[in-house]
Amino acid sequence: MNTRPLVTIGLPFYNSEDTLVAALKSVFAQTVDDWELIMVNDGGTDGSPEIAQAVNDPRVRVVDNRDNRKLAYRLNEIAQMARGKYLFRMDADDLLHSQRVEKQSTFLEEHPDVDVVDTARYTIDDEYNLIGVRGLAEIRKEPAQVLRAAPLIHATIAGPTQWFRDNPYDPTFPRSQDRDLWCRSAAHSNFGRIQEPLYFVREFGIHSTRRYLMHGHSNRRIFRKYGPEVVGWWKTRLLIAESHLKCGAYVVASVLGFEDRLIERRSIPLSDDLKQAGERELQMLLTVELPLRAGTDLK
């Protein structure tokens, strides 16, 4: 009997007790059940480990680390632990569309030449209101474009587990570790996209300014590392200067109370059909009942 699941869902978390239950509900809402879930605590100190350990399902594994090693390290760790043929990413403050695993695993089975596939995704706020959508356009893989902007939406990616083992993240990048990975791997890897939102990203009320500035710092490091070879020193300096200007503008907008407007502008406005479909999906996801150990209540 082959007990190897088709899919491993990797879910690292850090002080995520306010959002983890909803994330778990979206995993158990999947239309296929041939998956395992690996949950890794990255040294958080809130009630997240207790939430994770309350789930009563043999497909769920919880690793409760006391040290904070950051996302890239934990993603590499998950890739080594994964038993599934394919490895799926997700973040602890986001939700999966109920058909995500089915559609992405089917895509990978039908396109064995593809190493990593992402999907479009919805943007939501803290109250689960839909704000917009991203990732409807085709992927651009030109070296200069990969350097300038990540070609894939990181939280939505999936691919053969072996690819992630062969192409590990650089743990020295606390942010933008995906952009570093794409810069290193794009030339010898095939990327695909499902141009349908199969993921919900929470972007409001999560200390966006601090995150944005950290991303900016990591992006400038990437420009310095890869830019001279890809676009030359002059354009590299322009990219670095542009990054500094964007970070400065973001800080000013945050001080003036316009941060949410900037976040909203990153997404494309929703069509009526996408909005209605997204709202129905969210409503369903949030009503999913989790299998819990006796005496546990996560409401």
Image (cartoon, rainbow, N blue to C red):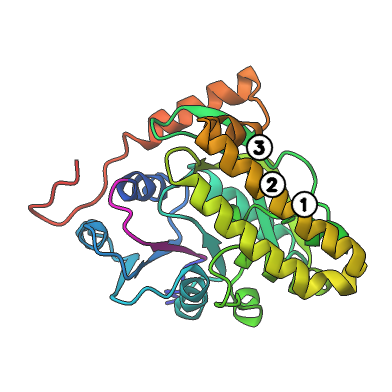
Residue 155 shows in the view: no
**Left or right: 84 in relation to 267:** left
Closer to the N terminus: mark 1 or mark 3?
Answer: 1
Look at label 1 and name its amino acid: Glu
Q: Position of residue 92 (x, y in %)?
A: 40, 54
The residue positioned 57% from the left and 43% from the top of the image is 251
Query: Who's the residue at 46% across and 55% down the image?
Result: 91
What kind of residue is marked 2? Lys
Does residue 100 sit above or below 57 in this rendering? above
- Characterize the local packing of mark 3: few (<14), some (14-19) or many (20 or more) Cα atoms within 10 angstroms: few
Q: Dot 3: what SS?
A: loop
Q: Position of residue 269 (x, y in %)?
A: 65, 25
> How far, Cα to Cα, is label 1 from label 3?
17 Å
Label 1 with label 2: CB-CB less than 8 Å: yes
| Residue 266 disc label | 3
- Give the position of the N terminus as an image quadrant: bottom left
Q: Is mark 2 on a helix, strand or loop?
A: helix
Q: Mark 1 points at which residue?
A: 242
Per the rendered image, the range of residues in magenta is 7-18
Q: Which of marks 2 and 3 is nearer the N terminus?
A: 2
- Left or right of residue 158, residue 233 in this image: right
Which residue: 29% across, 66% down? 58
Q: In this view, does 77 lie above or below 11?
A: below
Q: Could you classify mark 1 by the number of other residues whose Cα lies within 10 Å: few (under 14), some (14-19), or many (20 or more)?
A: few
Q: Distance between the residues labelled 2 and 3?
A: 13 Å
Q: Name the residue under label 2.
A: 246
Query: Is residue 28 visible to the viewer in this orientation of the structure?
Result: yes
- Indicate yes or no whether the magenta region holds residue 292: no
Q: Distance between the residues labelled 1 and 2?
A: 6 Å
Which quadrant holds residue 222?
Answer: bottom right
